[in-house]
Image (spheres, rainbow, N blue to C red):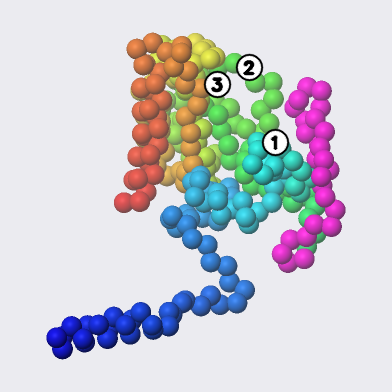
Amino acid sequence: MKRFLAAAFASAFLAFAPQVQAQTPPNVLVVGQIAEPKSLDPHAVTAVNDFRILVNLYDGLVRYKDGTLEVEPSLAESWTISEDGKTYTFKLREGVTFHNGDAFTADDVIYTYNRAIDPDKSIQIGIRTHAPETCGLEILYGEEIELLGINGVVELIEDRVGDAKAYMTFDIDCLDPAFAPGTGTPVSGGLSSREAMMILRRLGEIDFVGGDVVEVAPAYDHADITSIAGASVALTYIGLLAEKRR
């Protein structure tokens, strides 16, 4: 009986004890997320979890209207598009400043774009059609890969990219149609799947922050040849990231 009363008094004490809550310091924002963000740099993150934070930290030229996919003005109050659809001209909002008080100008927009894609650090591998405009990119045509050899191609990539952070986008039609028939724009004279994998596996020194595999079209594929090649590329890329964490 005494033990029961003791337990009863203890339960009553816990029930009526004032709850202690963690106090958030003034001017501090607490955000609950499912995982720690890898970065707060919008040019370096690829995870949806990170973007959920970044959309509340940064403004873009445009944004989606709440609850829709309709584009509306943000830092740009309006814009025009050339007749050929290649040139966008944005009119920036006036009176916008950064957190330190500096005025927001067109130079800041240009810097941001150049920071995301630096032509001097970018290279295209395996192009087979004529490119009248390189836009500052280095282009290595398909037939040049045979002349340089695998190691020569890797050295060219490493010299071009250097220690800059890099994003790899692998267009599956860089492979010859014999190895990737399931794509919308097949062009003869491309890489073999073996050549592509040999190049990728030697890019461990590149500081990759993201990547993708595009242009796989299952409707045009045969015996899943293209899908297997695309999956192999993606797996190799993931392996490069895993190797850096060891």
Q: Report whether 40 appears left or right of 62.
A: left
145 or 67, nearer to the observer:
67
Quickly name the residue at label 1: 70
Residue shown at the point (15%, 89%) measured from the top left:
2
Residue 127, disc = 3
The residue tagged with tag 2: helix, strand or loop? loop
Q: Farthest residue toward the front?
A: 1
Residue 50, image x, y percentages = 52, 51
Residue 233, disc = none
Earlier sequence position, callout 1 versus callout 2: 1
234 or 15, nearer to the observer:
15
| Residue type, mark 3 in image | Ile
Q: Tell me the CA gap for discs 2 and 3.
A: 8 Å
Residue 104, image x, y percentages = 78, 55
Q: Residue 81 lies in magenta, yes or no? A: yes
Q: Report whether 230 appears left or right of 96.
A: left
What secondary structure is the magenta-colored segment mainly? loop
Q: Residue 139 lies in magenta, yes or no? A: no
User: Where is 83 relative to 116, above or below?
Assistant: above
Is residue 151 in view?
Answer: no
Residue shown at the point (58%, 71%) measured from the top left:
28
201 or 28, nearer to the observer:
28
Name the quarter where the N terminus is drawn: bottom left
Q: Residues within 10 Å of mark 3 (few under 14, many from 20)?
A: many
Q: Tell me the CA gap for discs 1 and 2.
A: 36 Å
Quickly name the residue at label 2: 130
Is residue 186 in view?
Answer: yes
The residue tagged with tag 3: helix, strand or loop? strand
| Residue type, mark 1 in image | Glu
Marks 3, 1: nearer the viewer: 1
Do the residues bearing badges 2 and 3 touch, measured as CB atoms within 8 Å? no
